[in-house]
Image (cartoon, helix red, strand yellow):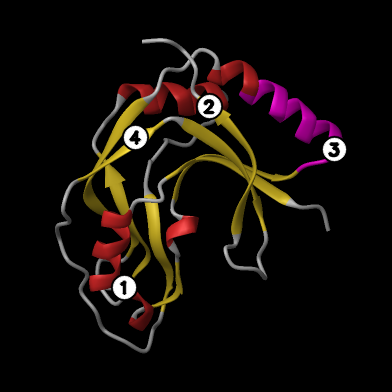
Amino acid sequence: MQPHYFIAIPVADEALKDFAETLLLDRHYKTVYELEEYHLTLRFLGALAAEEHTAWWQRLEAITQHVSPFTLQLDHLERFGSVERPRVFAAGPRYEEKLFQLAYQLNPESSKPFVPHVTLAKKWNPEVTYLPPEHMPAVAVPVKEIVLYRIYPAERPRYQADARFQLRKKQ
């Protein structure tokens, strides 16, 4: 089986981790993300052949030369699925034009709307009842790079950097 990849912004923020720990998400979800796995997905790529991997590497090098660093403000919670039993529990960022421009550059042909979020937990445990909180403390995350992640389903962390690309446009 070929390895699977995705492109994302790393979000290894201690304040976000501390907030997530207070929620005791492991009691309610089968999969709880670790600090090293926090990310905001820009595009899922799936399995890549060697030549596709090289093409993406070159494309990411070219794109990041024209994007300047910016800051994300994670300031609200996102839930996907039912309100009482969301299958995905995540932190969402305030609207940031540079984020949407970057996502568009990576996936201009997408017919799906881009819904930025940092997943904290997923796969609801149906044996429990839990109403997640409505609010979270705001967290500022500097965005200085994007990462091509490789997925290792049986390892921890599951998502490991294959390559890092610094945002290099001068402000």
On the image, the x and y values in percent for residue 53 come to: 77, 35
Quadrant occupied by the C terminus: top left
Q: Is residue 43 above or below residue 117?
A: above
Q: Type of residue at label 4? A: Pro
On the image, the x and y values in percent for residue 24 come to: 29, 77
Q: Mark 1 points at which residue?
A: 85
Closer to viewer: mark 2 or mark 1: 2
Distance CA(mark 4)–CA(mark 3): 31 Å
Q: Name the residue under label 2.
A: 166
Which structural element holds mark 1? loop
Disc sitting over residue 140 in the figure: none
Q: Is residue 21 above or below residue 151?
A: below
Q: For the magenta stretch, what is the residue range?
A: 48-60
Kindly identify the residue that appears in the image at 50 percent across and 12 percent down: 66
Kindly identify the residue that appears in the image at 32 percent across and 61 percent down: 17
On screen, residue 44 versus residue 55, left or right, reads: left
Upstream in sequence: badge 1 or badge 4: 1
